[in-house]
């Protein structure tokens, strides 16, 4: 079976603007998984395409390219203030209802792209406008991910279910937060960024290694 094209608008769509450096990162968390941290307000989702903006994660047409039967730009998720919208470019369902244009997303919304690619939208805490996408079906980009963070202001990582990334074995929470064009981390735990104290706040740069009691993660820019 070929990739879905019958009612898509690929022929009328221009390729996605190339992702700017520093607009998306990979978060490698020991014992937890690999997460894409996406900073832009709009994420374009599609199927496989020509190599493009983010290597094994995206294409020239989409910021997230799944190995699935999708058009090159199948749908977009758009952040507007503290709200998120799903915009359909090809057959899309939200909570089993067809989306003809756009729909407001709520916590635990099931997004079905075409017939079998399923993602779950989450906003685990009212204290942050950041949202998460879980890859509920088996469909993945070429670079395997355990989840996607649509980072608005902060990203919470820790043992409770209200964190964006649940790290069961951690003894406390680490907060990633935006400050201008930079991403910083802080925690009530004693943590270190590249062996330097970081509990009160430290700038994350590509290759930063953050460690603490029973925790360690690496921060890498997506090229």
Image: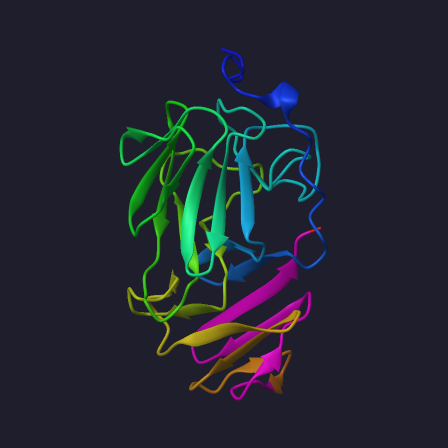
Residue 100 percent coordinates (x, y) = 40, 28
On screen, residue 136 versus residue 78, left or right, reads left
The residue shown at (50%, 54%) is 35
Q: Is residue 200 above or below residue 108?
A: below
Colouring mode (rainbow / by chain / secondary structure / one colour): rainbow
Q: Is residue 217 magenta?
A: yes
The residue shown at (39%, 62%) is 164
Residue 201 percent coordinates (x, y) = 56, 84
Q: Picture quarter containing residue 27?
A: bottom right
Residue 33 percent coordinates (x, y) = 46, 55
Q: Is residue 14 above or below residue 171?
A: above
Count up the numbered dots: 0
Residue 216 percent coordinates (x, y) = 51, 71
Question: What residue span does the magenta drawing correspond to?
Answer: 197-222
The residue shown at (49%, 26%) is 68
Q: Is residue 6 above or below residue 173?
A: above
């Amino acid at each position: 079976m070929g990739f879905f094209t019958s009612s898509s608008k690929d022929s009328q769509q221009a390729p996605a603007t190339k992702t700017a450096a520093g607009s998306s990162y990979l978060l490698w968390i020991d014992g937890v998984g690999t997460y894409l941290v996406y900073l832009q307000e709009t994420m374009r989702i599609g199927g496989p395409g020509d190599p493009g903006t983010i290597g094994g994660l995206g294409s020239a047409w989409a910021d997230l390219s799944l190995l699935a039967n999708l058009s090159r730009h199948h749908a977009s998720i758009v952040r507007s203030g503290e709200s998120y919208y799903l915009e359909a470019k090809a057959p899309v369902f939200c909570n089993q209802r067809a989306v003809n244009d756009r729909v407001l997303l709520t916590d635990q919304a099931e997004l079905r792209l075409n017939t079998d690619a399923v993602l779950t939208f989450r906003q685990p805490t009212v204290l942050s406008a950041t949202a998460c996408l879980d890859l509920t079906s088996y469909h993945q980009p070429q670079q395997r991910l355990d989840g996607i963070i649509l980072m608005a202001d902060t990203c919470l990582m820790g043992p409770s279910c209200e964190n964006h990334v649940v790290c069961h074995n951690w003894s406390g929470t680490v907060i990633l937060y935006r400050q201008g064009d930079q991403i910083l981390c802080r925690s009530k735990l004693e943590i270190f960024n590249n062996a330097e104290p970081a509990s009160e706040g430290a700038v994350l740069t590509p290759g930063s290694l953050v460690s603490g009691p029973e925790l360690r993660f690496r921060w890498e820019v997506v090229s």
